[in-house]
Amino acid sequence: MDKDPLILVVDDETQILRALKAILGANHFRVLSATTGKEALILAAAQCPDIIILDLSLPDMDGIAVCEQIREYSRVPIIILSVRDNERDKVAALDRGADDYLTKPFGIEELLARIRVALRHSAQSPGNTQTVIRAASITIDLARHIVLRDEEEVRLTATEFKLLAYLAGHADRVLTHQAILTHVWGSTEADHVEYLRVFMGQLRKKLEPNPDDPQHLITEPGVGYRFKTGE
Amino acid sequence: MIPKKAIVLPESFHFALRLIAPVLVIGVATLLLQLLSSLLGAEIIALLYLLPIMVCTVLWGLTPGLIAGFMAFLAFNYLFLPPYYTFMVHRTQDLLTLSVFLVVAVVMSQLIGQARHGLELAHHREWEATRMYEFISAISGQHNIHTVTQFIAHHTQEAFRLERVEVYQDNPRRDESYVYALPEKSEAVRKPDLSIPMMTARTLEGEIRLWLKGELLTKEEQRLLEAFASQGALALERIRLSQGENRAQVLEESDRLKTSLLSSVSHELRSPLAAIKASVSSLRSGAVDWDNAARQDLLATIEEETDHLNLLVGNLLDMSRIEAGALKPQKKWNSIEEIAAGVVTKMRKQLKEHQLELDFHPDLPLVSSDYVMIAQVFTNLISNSVKYAPPHTAITIQGRREGEQVHIKVINQGPHVPEEHLERIFDKFYRVTAADRVTGTGLGLSICKGMIESHGGRIWAANGPRRFEFHFTLPLTLDGSTPRIPQEENGG
């Protein structure tokens, strides 16, 4: 990239803004900040940031509403950064267009890693998606429907492959139960988390060296799953 | 309000029947007696006339009986007493017969009519008393407003001929009013025919609304309905008042807890804050030139203590949700083994000095549970085990199916807890040893208890042979159902 990526940070806590500006600046990002939802919407439209970090509790409007309004015209990655740690808020934010969710207090390494993942995804989508995904010893060829583990082909059922392909196609991002169930089984089955428990268990047995300590097929408690490439 | 047409017609019809029937009966009797008149004396005929009069009184009541008596009197005079076919009487003896006949007929009708009325009344009273008894015994043992409302509707429907009944439970002090209709889920197509308020001396508790099947309620039925309404109102009021009392008790209890919580927690919150403040202020003061290792130490302290503070705040929040009864599990079908494995992975750093073993039966079914809460329970039980069990010993997590529940054990080789304390370790701020070497909020185990109980499970602790065990159970069904797993199409 010829210029450093531009980050819009939306938070009404001035201490958090001050800390994030300093830390992100030191990590070669240009930082814009907003303290209200309205300000955030104006800046998002006028400055076209490369990524938005958004707090859910804003003085004038709910963060999820901000997220929805931005999604009406833009695919810019949005990472939620909030003290709300209940799963319902996380799921709501992710289902309404957020790309990722991090709870306060957070480790800065974690935040930087999530920012990198989000930027990488926005650089490649849409259209030119990768067809071969590699994560440690696992190789998934989406086009040819082939999955290799340690260079040996793993036989997956059609449903298992569909599930794995969807997760790997959105590598390193949280996918909610509902999103996964709707994609793999259809919207009528969107409440049946038990399907996922069973099929994810099968996938882990076939792909993970230690299914009890998965490295790639990661559970996001109460929210969904994440396919971790381990960048 | 009352549909007039529907009731006027049968009522007048009934009335006409009561007038015409005795005339007909006496007519028929007169024809028969006329045939037999040559064989019988006038006195016998007078006696025989008493029979149809009695029949009329028994069948239709006092007025038809009197009508029959009067008709019989006229017919007897006209046909059977000379001079025949006139209403005149010549002989003194006949006049006497006629007079006695009239008196007997009237008195008899009256006596039979009263007996009949009394019997009817007794039947009604019995019916009323039975209904009332059933009603009161049904609602008296209840502690739930909705159940009582439903009972009132069911009993009203059984007691009266109704198209539809609706019981509305209302309370001005809360906005949770409740309506129950029978047949269930039926919609009212018109205004109710009758609405009876359910009132106590103090408040209006609600209303019973009736849609009748044509006929009006009799006076007795109305009286019964009013009794239902007032008894129902009393039952509703009783429950409401006792609930208010419970709430007051709960509030008092939670107030007491908050006070002890504040005193216990302020210490726990201040120590990490003190460490952070000390570390940060030393790093910022330019007085000392810290070497790299010392800097790293101070920074590590800050990070660890921040995490500790965050954990404390999380615990306090969980506890306050449990106390407020606001802890509602988001139940989904989960693999308990997966939850346990996830927790173990997360706690790897704290588990450095212990070996952790997972021992789950391979066929353990999915359990309807809140992933995050059960993970929290495992976290608290494991960190409790880590605190008390000696280093380099094993901590085992076991899962087995036992009938309609799953039984989980977290086993460590920590010291025994005296039997009399086993139950109390799940109480808030309860510590077995007074001078406690262990840090924490004293909330971990009581949070576990709150979370497991909100799942309909049970949690307890036990001393085993050279080990200490935590046990908990979770029901395997969710609203009576078990998970449905789609059949995999042909693999490929």
Image: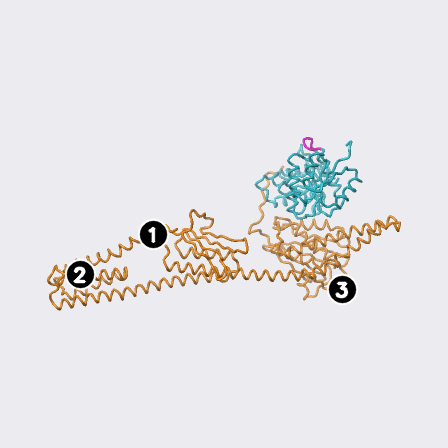
Chain colours: A cyan, B orange
Which mark is first along the chain, 1 or 3? 1
Q: Which residue is mark 3?
A: B435
**Quarter of the C terminus of chain B within the rendering:** top right
Query: Pointer 3 indicates a residue of which chain?
Result: B
Q: Are marks 3 and 1 in contact (CB under 8 Å)?
A: no
- Mark 2, secondary structure of its residue: helix
Which mark is first along the chain, 2 or 1? 1
User: Residue B124's x, y, as percent?
Assistant: 36, 62
- Mark 1, secondary structure of its residue: helix
Q: Are marks 3 and 2 on the same chain?
A: yes
What segment is highlighted magenta in the picture? A124-130
Q: Nearer the viewer, residue B488 or A181?
A: A181
Q: Is residue B223 left or right of residue B68?
A: right
- Mark 3, secondary structure of its residue: loop
Question: Is disc 3 surrounded by few (<14), some (14 to 19) or many (20+) residues within 10 Å?
Answer: few
Spatial CA span between label 3 and label 1 = 85 Å
Q: Amino acid at mark 1?
A: Ile
Q: Are marks 1 and 2 on the same chain?
A: yes
Q: Is residue B272 left or right of residue A218?
A: right
User: Residue B80's x, y, as percent?
Assistant: 14, 62
User: Residue A124's x, y, as percent?
Assistant: 71, 33
Q: Nearer the viewer, mark 3 or mark 2?
A: 2
Q: Quadrant of residue B437?
A: bottom right
Query: Pointer 2 indicates a residue of which chain?
Result: B
User: Residue B318's x, y, as percent?
Assistant: 67, 54
Whether B284 is among the magenta residues is no
Q: Which residue is mark 2?
A: B74
Q: Which residue is mark 1?
A: B7
Q: Amino acid at mark 3?
A: Ala
Question: Is disc 1 surrounded by few (<14), some (14 to 19) or many (20+) residues within 10 Å?
Answer: few
Spatial CA span between label 3 and label 2 = 112 Å
Q: Is residue B327 left or right of residue B176?
A: right
